Amino acid sequence: MNKQEFLDEYLVDRHNTNSMKWDTLKDTYGDSNLISMWIADTEFKPAQRVTDAMIQRVLHGPMGYSIVPDSYYKAFSDWMEIRYNFPIKKDWIRFSTGVVTGIAYCVNAFTQVGESIMILSPVYYPFADVIKKNRRNLVEVDLNYDNKGHFSMNYDNIEKTIVDNDVKMFLQCSPHNPAGRVWTEDELAKVLEICKKHNVLVVSDEIHQDLVLSGHKFIPSATVANGKYRDNLVTLNSGSKSFNLAALNHSHIIITNQKLMEQYDQLAHAINRTEVDEMGVVATEAAYRYASSWLAHVLEIVEDNYNYLKKELRNRAPKITVCDLEGTYLVMIDLRKYVALDEVHDFVVKKCHLAVDYGEQFGEKYLGFVRLNMATDPRYVKAAVDNIVSAVAE
């Protein structure tokens, strides 16, 4: 199947389907006729084998309480071993309705009210929300930004911030949303070593692990330095972004340290959250078994869309900086050389006719940036580029 054949088979129009991405535009942005490039899901149906597995389960009938079969654990472990050299033991896994919920569980299981938790900004905004809503002290360290589209970690600032604020937990994003970075093993080793040195527990959101573009390699934090940092680490991941299954409410919490697992289980049982979403299990197992070629097609479309966006804006609106996209399907663009900061929202909605996530949602210093979703119909990307170019030319 080539790219066009994949698009013909799997691309769908999601208008009027109760899609948060498309059917809330009037309420969220004041205009229902925008090109929607904000929330992180895609316009692609799941792989056919995934859909078939869900249909088979529905036709069986009863939707009572269910367990996770051994076949699921094997499919997940095989996926992680083949792709990342990280086979997963059944006893290491707990489940959550989503990675953000998993973060909230970890915050409550492993820290106390008032303790400090660190994030690297700009970062997925629920990180900060979870910390603040659970009455922990939010500590932010800015990533270095070179004004050419590349983000990196500032290790001296990270270590100083940990010491000065008595940080107890670091919420890591790997690959990093929205900076687009796929951290190298060396970068991960440096930050994990700092955290180990100062007894800071790392909770690593790795939900975008499978969404990596050409020339880059995802490294699970648990495999860095041959697993040196596993005892100081909780990994959160899911098939939800990889296979467009977010509505099925199913994700993993991976803990290899038995003492940490016991601590986590105390919290989980106290709030009675040990059941799983049956359809999430069915669909995700099928995806790990049968959807690797489907995922490869999606990544090809994401990469082509990103390359088109970058090339066209460089040629037609050269003062816009398109940030590097190594992983995820979410790219930041820097509009600050074209648009006054207090006019960005009106510029994007009223002139570019786009629905986006705004940079300041991810960190207050990023007003003037917007984040665009590349896992979409190439026609939307081309229209978005044309709209942006026309708007900056006015």
Image (tube, rainbow, N blue to C red):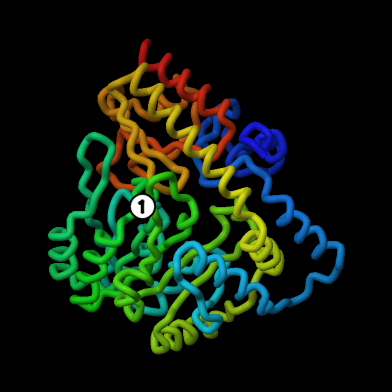
Give me the residue at 56% from left, 29% from top.
378
Identify the image quadrant of the C terminus. Answer: top left
Q: Is residue 226 above or below residue 211?
A: below
Examine the rendering and report whether any part of residue 373 can be seen. no
The image quarter in which residue 322 lies: top left
The image quarter in which residue 390 lies: top left
Q: Which of 158 and 348 lies nearest the eye of the viewer?
A: 158
How busy is the neighbourhood of tag 1: few (under 14 within 10 Å), some, or many (20 plus)? Answer: many
Badge 1 amino acid: Val
Q: Is residue 374 left or right of residue 6?
A: left
Q: Which of 96 and 116 lies nearest the eye of the viewer?
A: 96
Q: Position of residue 341 (x, y in %)?
A: 28, 29
Identify residue for label 1.
182
Give me the residue at 16% from left, 65% from top.
159
Q: Is residue 336 left or right of residue 238?
A: left
Give me the residue at 30% from left, 47% from top.
363
Q: Position of residue 100 (x, y in %)?
A: 47, 62
Q: Position of residue 16 (x, y in %)?
A: 71, 37
Examine the rendering and report whether any part of residue 83 can be seen. yes
